[in-house]
Amino acid sequence: TDHGNLFGAFEFHHAARKEKVKPILGIEAYVAPGDRRDRTHTGSMDGGFHLVLLALDLEGWRNLLRLSSDSYLNGFYYKPRMDKSTLSEWNAGLVAINGHLGSSIAFHLDQFVRTNQSKHWDAAVAEAEWHRDTFVPGPDGEPRFYIELQRHVDDQERINPLLKKLAKKLGLP
């Protein structure tokens, strides 16, 4: 995945197919903390939270194209941003992965670790519930929303137990 765009997707697809490898196309999207068209400077994630989106099929690829194009045309503020309204509209055929330090869920969990205020835990739960309810399992029952774990920086290691707890609480993979 490229950050905020699909610029490398065609070249990647061609190279993978040439080697008889099935490519998985996606984007590491930037999701605005509110309306993507709002350009009010807040100093907190104005460029958007990270959300990995992967296409499951042709419909998913078309939705990635829609989301990416709209992010540049209507959501650009620091970075090309989508928002919850566009994700709600164009999520068919996509898998979402949220949890690394740049994500909305990790942002709230990090605040929880720093302050021990339950409002931050509650905000993380609400974010995960929104993603779960937006990226509902496909017709085959396969999940379309995953909690992401990474193990390479201390800040991420601090929230990984909370990500696991959150996933267990909500029955998420």
Image (cartoon, helix red, strand yellow):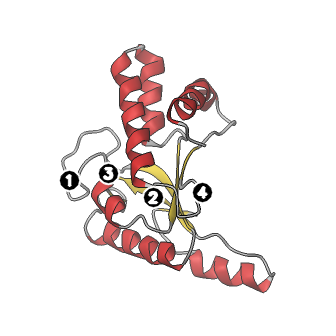
Q: Which labelled disc corresponds to residue 32?
A: 3
What is the x, y in percent for residue 46?
A: 31, 47
Q: Residue at x 37, y 74 (%)?
A: 66
Q: Which of marks 4 and 1 precedes in the sequence? A: 1
| 35 w.r.t. 90: above or below | above
* 156 or 41, nearer to the observer: 156
Secondary structure found at label 2: strand
| Residue beneath disc 2 | 29
Q: Residue at x 52, y 61 (%)?
A: 138
Give the foreground label among 2 and 4. Answer: 4
CA–CA distance in space, label 1 to label 4: 37 Å
Secondary structure found at label 3: loop
Q: Which of marks 4 and 2 precedes in the sequence? A: 2
CA–CA distance in space, label 3 to label 2: 10 Å
Mark 3 Cα-neighbour bin, 10 Å: few <14, some 14–19, many ≥20: many
| 63 w.r.t. 127: above or below | below
Residue found at the very far right of the displayed protein: 19
Q: Which labelled disc corresponds to residue 39?
A: 1
Q: Which of marks 3 and 1 precedes in the sequence? A: 3
Residue found at the very far top of the displayed protein: 116
Give the foreground label among 1 and 3. Answer: 3
What is the x, y in percent for residue 45?
A: 35, 43
Q: Identity of the amino acid at label 2?
A: Ala
What is the x, y in percent for residue 42?
A: 24, 40
Q: Identity of the amino acid at label 4?
A: Glu
| Residue beneath disc 4 | 142
Task: Say if mark 3 contacts mark 2, CB within 8 Å.
Answer: no
